[in-house]
Image: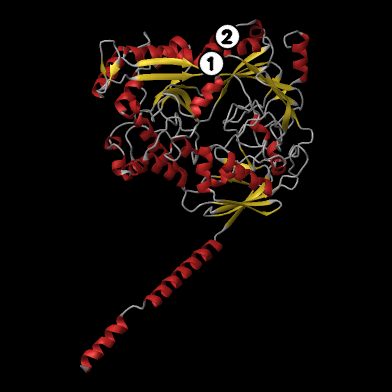
Amino acid sequence: MNTARAAARVRAKDRVNPLQAAAALALALILALAAATLARAQETIVKAHGFAEFGTLKYPQGFARFDYVNPDAPKGGELAISAVGTFDSMNPFTRKGRAGALSSDQFESLLVESYDEPGAYYGLIAESLEYPESQDWVVFNLRPEARFSDGTPVTADDVVFSHNILLDQGLKSYAEAVRKRIPKAEALGPHRVKFHFSPDFPRRSMITQVGGTPVFSKAWFEADPDNRRLDEPRLDPGIGSGPYVLESVDVNQRIAYRRNPDYWGAELNVNVGRHNYDRIRVEYFGDAIAAMEGFKAGVYTLRAENNSKSWATAYDFAAVDNGQVIKAEIPDGNVPAASGFVMNLLKPAFQDIRVREALQLGFNFEWTNESLQYGLFRHRSSFWQDSPLAAQGLPEGREKEVLAALGDQIDPSLLTSEPVMAHSSKADRPGDRKNLRRSMKLLDEAGWMVGGDGLRRNAKGEVLKLEFLVDSPIIGRIVQPYITNLRSMGVDAVLNRVDYAQYTSRRREKEFDMISHAYPMSLEPSTGLYQYFGSEAHEYSVFNPAGLADPAIDTLIGNIVNAKTQEELRANARALDRVLRAKRFVVPTWYLDVNWIAYWDMYGRPENLPPYNSGFLDLWWADAERAAALKAAGALR
């Protein structure tokens, strides 16, 4: 008995006391938290005049100006440009309606991008910023002299208000994404604001994202909160801090902006040689043909051309022949926008990749380019065309490792095959017979069989229908032969041109089968990829018209945003490019590596324009003598 009691006492000593265990665990957590806090406290805090996502900034602290500007550019005169369509709001952030051209330019941000180095930003409203190496947060120190156009100071409270109102009343897809990634913005003082970033999301580009937030006047909105909302259309744009303010607006006719003579930032180094016009006028036209005629008549004076037919044939008037109008092709160093005909993957018929490939094969780029676009374009395949981020050949090295890590989330053939390329076609007829035969075989395999009426139906008897929604006669002209090819394949395809307001509404609500769309891409892609291709908000995001949602794509986007080096970013971007192309949700169309700009010979421009912006809005200037000569000759109105 004594032995048994002794053994029991030994066993009791070995038992863990629950209260002691809980206390030990709590202590361990406290110590771990304290260690993490100490580690963060010991992090190096970077203090800088700008921010580069990779590498170092080109321009040092206290730089005088950007290299690409003309510091002696004269101020004065007018830039007159055009817009096609309609508008019903001067609030560019509304969830409804269509905003007027350049209406967002009145609102400045904390940082401004450089035009000659990708992924580099310098202080505008903010004179400096501070952040830890982990980039868990960032503090912006605002310039005390920053002012809104009514003369009131721009403060940290205005920045916090702007962040919050964009979350509460901004575009839903934007708000949902940002709310999770940037949980808090706080004013640390009148001119000091801090953004906190969630540890659950990549933080590489969070600083540039918040640095690009437009800054609104809190006082202006709160003076009439019922009528001054960010999500509602209104003709009163509010007040910003930018160099131009609204002068006049005539709905669907014209918009005029005038330079603010009291603009607070005129002497900043990032503004030297910029914002040279006294006035910027936008003339509205009902269609592209009318807009071209307006340019020829001198109603407006600079035209950024986007129509190959116009560029090839419409500039045959006397003012071009005698040198009064200049046609310029300015090199464009940006990644071409990933343009194409986008399928709405929320539609059941597009769920089968064989259907999507068949629809791709129905488009004949070579014939379209030669017959309708004067051979001026090149066929796009990659989402990062002609850049180091474009997938090429077989995957190898880091790119192959990235793809292999996705496991069964991707088709294993991606590891052993070249990326999907835009198919070639013969240019002698709108429909390439070889490609059309292949497309019809794919549709047969997908279960869409041709009936006696020539239309394809599935096993349920449903017709394979496709409505291509457009709002432009230019696009309609290009799309119509494609529609004819689809109909020859047995697809009940129709082209539906609607007015601009209806198009905007239907696109926003994803009430379409296919549209023409261009995804803006960059050399240093980041969180914007979530909005273009991410699963989050894919059902309603206006930036993801395809409604694309795929876990492998989400993973690759996360890798890109988390990249610590440029090579890591590029390897993941090449992998993403390969996966996106394999999804076949876009019929790739065309691209250019130059900007087409025609202008009446009354403008000057810097000798060395930057590679990433043609600069006609803010780097060029009006030449008063040449403008006067044109008016004296009766060339301009």
Residue 494 relative to residue 499: left or right: left
For the question of whether residue 58 can be seen, the reply is: no
- Residue 253 drawn above or below residue 419: above
Q: Nearer the viewer, residue 587 or 508?
A: 508
Dot 2, how many residues are within 10 Å of its Cα: few (below 14), some (14-19), or many (20+)?
some
Q: Quadrant of residue 289?
A: top right
Residue 70 shown left or right of residue 98 in the figure:
right
Tags 2 and 1 touching, CB below 8 Å: yes
Residue 363: x percent and y percent? 38, 17
Q: Which residue is mark 1?
A: 307
169 lies left or right of 455: right
Q: Is residue 60 above or below residue 342?
A: below
In whole angstroms, how far apart are the C-alphas of marks 2 and 1? 10 Å
Q: Position of residue 276 (x, y in %)?
A: 73, 28
Q: Which mark is residue 314?
A: 2
- The x, y position of residue 306, in whole percent, is 55, 18
Residue 557 visible in the current orientation: yes
Report helix, strand or loop for mark 1. Answer: loop
Decide: is 495 above or below 522.
above
Q: Residue at x 59, y 35 (%)?
A: 116
Ranked by sequence position, the earlier of labels 2 and 1 is 1
In depth, the one of 305 and 393 nearer the eye is 305
* Quarter of the image where the N terminus is located: bottom left
